[in-house]
Amino acid sequence: MTEQARTAPPLAPARPWPPPPNRLSAAVDNALARPAAQQPQWSDAGAVHRVRAVLESVTPVVRVEEVDRLRARLAAVAGGHAFLLQGGDCAETFAQTTERYIAGTVHTLSRMTAVLTAAGRLPVVTVGRVAGQYGKPRSAPLDPSGLPSYRGDIVNAVEATAEARAPDPDRMVRAYVNSRAAMAVVNALLATGAVGPAGRALATSGLFTSHEALLLDYERAMLRVDARDPDAPKLYDLSSHFLWIGERTRQLDGAHIAFAELLANPVGIKIGPTTTPEQAVEYAERLDPHKEAGRLTLISRMGSARVRQVLPPIVEKVTASGHTVLWQCDPMHGNTVTSGSGYKTRHFDHILSEVRGFFEVHRALGTHPGGLHVELTGGDVTECLGGAQRISAADLHRRYETACDPRLNRAQALELASLVAEMLRPRP
Ligand SMILES: O=C[C@H](O)[C@H](O)COP(=O)(O)O
Ligand SMILES: C=C(OP(=O)(O)O)C(=O)O
């Protein structure tokens, strides 16, 4: 969490739709009045207000019933009866909202699901980083050329010009439209079986969506009230089924955690190597106050060199606190390096080593290594080193296509799934 927390400019309240009960509305305002890291400096507060009003009146991207179904399935994962596979782009782009591109991701997830299910003899819950992963937190506000950093298509454009990098609130509407379109493609692929025989695994179990709950002006506009129980109305963020808070925005006194506290969705938090066991327990108490399995996923991204030391005391303390959290391993974000030629990359061996370390820790403590969270694409890119294809530093330039961080290509993703499947295989 290197960047200073910056607070978005104050905005007049947007038109609420449907009108949330005053109590919920006040709780959202209070949460979002806290310092919010990684928010763009919009230049036109009025435009943000207008966009929020538009988004508050649209049909949401996902449905309450689907969110509830995922939460129940994640409860099974947290209880040790299933495994969670989560994967997709580092940064989805609007240009890639095409059937061909999305089919590549869905097909890869589908194949991974089939491999994991067959070996592990556990049901697999599959969640894509799809249909909304448009916001990116950055290490620095400016890129090396001095331009504002690219913060994902929901904020600005990746092209290296001052005009492209200016935050544009209308992009939030485009993010919504692209999310809906991507969702429609995913549903059509699953319904028609167009993802091939391996797609049957997903056709029956479904593919849920997820993204980082980063851009608070967008996420708050996608809140909807479920008043099926009028005495206990609930707030859902219907931009996605599952939302997570990132490593750079997990400040306990910040707006993101306070926002996540209000949601009925299942939520995750990325925990990096500076996380203390006490902080992890506080996350569990804040985000899982009723001790409901499936509500909170702790996504560890410690790095292959540190996972075996840093993770055990966290798991022990959270377990002792009585919260049944879902433990998931993100072996990507703690293993990023820069190649000699300047490409951000990750080595397959380090990724695999972190997953092995994660399994070793949980096996030693008797807890469930519940899930895997990876950045991948269905394309044949050359962004991560190693794997059976032996991608070398000299290969990186060939198809380095990511808009932000390096992703496993299709072959590397399937290779990783096979190796994780071995780890899941029931032992005699
Ligand atoms: O995906 C994670 C972050 O957005 C990303 O690693 C930040 O990259 P940066 O360090 O290049 O800003
Ligand atoms: C930004 C991400 O990860 P982290 O918060 O763990 O750095 C991400 O998963 O896109």
Image (spheres, helix red, strand yellow):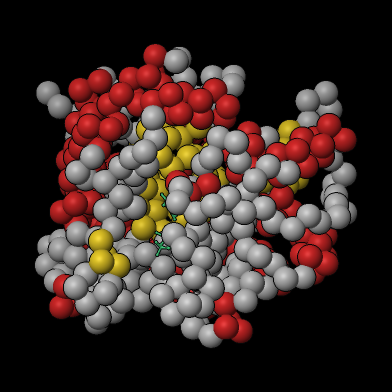
| Residue 336 sits in quarter | bottom left
Foreground: 278 or 226? 278
Relative to 299, does residue 190 appear above or below in the rendering?
Answer: below
Relative to 130, is 119 above or below?
Answer: above
396 versus 424 height, above or below: below
The x and y percentages for residue 199 are 38, 56
Q: Position of residue 291 (x, y in %)?
A: 54, 19
Where, by quadrant of the figure, is residue 408 drawn? bottom left
Give the residue drawn at x 51%, y 29%: 283
Image coords of residue 285 (percent x, y): 54, 23
Whether residue 404 is visible to the viewer of this picture, yes or no, is yes
In this picture, residue 70 sits left or right of residue 351: right
- The residue shown at (45%, 51%) is 2
Instruction: Tell me how many marks there are.
Output: 0
Residue at (63% x, 33% y) in the render: 261
Whether residue 228 can be seen here: no
Report the image quarter containing ligand 1.
bottom left
Provide residue 341's location: percent of width, then percent of height. Answer: 22, 77
Task: Name the foreground residue: 134 vs 247.
Answer: 247
Q: Residue at x 41, y 21 (%)?
A: 318
Quadrant (top left, top right, bottom left, bottom right) of the C terminus: top left
Q: Quadrant of residue 217?
A: bottom right
Pick whichever, 236 or 358, lies toward us. 358
- Horizontally, residue 68 falls left or right of residue 404, namely right
